[in-house]
Amino acid sequence: MKLRSMAFAAGLAAASLGATLGVTSALAQAKEQFFPVLVYRTGAYAPNGVPFANGYVDYLKYVNAKGGINGVKISFEECETGYATDKGVECYERLKGKGATVFQPLSTGITFALTDKVITDKIPLITAGYGRADSADGMAFRWNFPLLGTYWTAADVLIQHLAKKEGGPDKLKGKKIALVYHDSPYGKEPIPLLQERAKMHGFDLSLLPVAHPGVEQKATWLQIRQSRPDYVLLWGWGVMNSAALKEAVATGFPRDKMYGVWWSGAEPDVKDVGANAKGYNALAMQHGAEPNAKVVKDILATLHDKNQGTGPKDEVGQVLYMRGLISAMLGVEGVKAAQERYGKGKVMNTEQVRWGLENLNLDQKKIDALGFSGVMRPVSTSCADHMGASWARLHTWDGAKWSFSSDWYQADDQILKPLIRASADKYMTEKKLQRRTAADCQ
């Protein structure tokens, strides 16, 4: 008995050390809720991937420090993808058998690759602010949850904002809008929505792909200098964003005429450009930099002040750190929602967690209780709606920091829903799948 107690104590010490280092427990224990953590801390996209991963891991640690999910402790394990789809699939295959609760790949390419797999494996896939836009249709995509918004949401909000700036949608007629995009599934996602809006409003849309990793953009910006668009939309990631801003400076394109998606509007995107990026705008999805949020202060006190945080202390509350924090919170709240139905204090299986994610109801009271007051709007999902919210606002770089610069916008369902339905139906036909019925939602 004494030997068993010593072994147990040693195991606890090892787990504590792993959590402190931001490395993770290697195996999910029977009484723990296991969260696989797909990250890219290396490679061309590491400057953006690292703060997201740090925020994600810190939230899991924070929940554990507060007693777990209704008493159920979280175990987790990182797996490096380098933003490569093949590596992401390898991570998925390696970790799914360890009792994975939910996967969050932080890559649209990996999302596309895993969408078919999760149907068979029955594991939820959260893609908060990325992934397949058509997966908002829960009647077609049972296991995908593009919570908080998709790239069609983002594109629609940006066009709404430009229309407002010009004095109305009719004033967009004859305008030139260029999309500078990462030549990958991620960068191509907004194109159908932008093409639909171009038909509606009569603006000229030019598509300018940039090859991975996005460092070389001189030819792209030469085209922009020659065509002189009224606005440039930037759908970049990692080094591509700062490279685009530097080329805009070099070619004299006004930064206040540039609008990035929410993955092109964080501190790493502008810090190397500094004051020269002043006036650059980007979507903030729901949140921006949130140094004064209650959850940020709690995490600093609970983890970082005790040298148990992940990454540098001064990063806590920055844009991508918050994105990771919120993404982890959504996964945890999916488990909590499942526990409300299937039993508090119990480890939830993937079918139960899927139900929880499909019945999320993060109203203002819950958001405030979680410490996210002022950071995000309420989120409510259903069997048919796996997105749960379609709001966004913009923030602008003033040369030193990001500040909110617009009111809230909500994507137009009259435009989005037909596109989502048509794309989802096409996917189901190709895969020979059947649309869910109301009976499937009980």
Image (spheres, grey):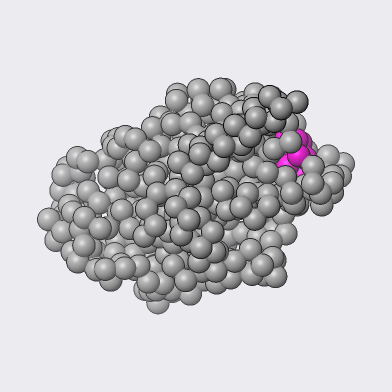
Picture residue at 61% right of the left edge, 31% below the top: 11
Res 429 → quadrant: top right
The residue sitting at the front extreme is: 2
- Could you tell me residue 422's position as x and y percent? 62, 42
- Could you tell me residue 231's position as x and y percent? 30, 61
Picture residue at 72% right of the left edge, 45% below the top: 72
Q: Give the range drawn in magenta.
A: 347-357
Picture residue at 75% right of the left edge, 26% below the top: 1
Question: Of residues 119 and 268, which is closer to you in this image?
Answer: 268
Does 50 appear in magenta?
no
- Tell me, yes or no, if residue 122 can be seen here: no
Picture residue at 47% right of the left edge, 71% below the top: 292
- Residue 405 as seen in the image, left or right of residue 255: right
- Could you tell me residue 270's position as x and y percent? 27, 58
Question: Of residues 63 and 238, which is closer to you in this image?
Answer: 63
Main SS of the magenta part reads: helix
Position above or below: 230 against 227: below
Question: Of residues 91 and 131, which is closer to you in this image?
Answer: 91
- Residue 180 as seen in the image, left or right of residue 370: left
The residue sitting at the bottom extreme is: 167
Image quadrant occupied by the C terminus? top right
Position above or below: 346 against 299: above
Res 365 → quadrant: bottom right
- Residue 338 as seen in the image, left or right of residue 282: right
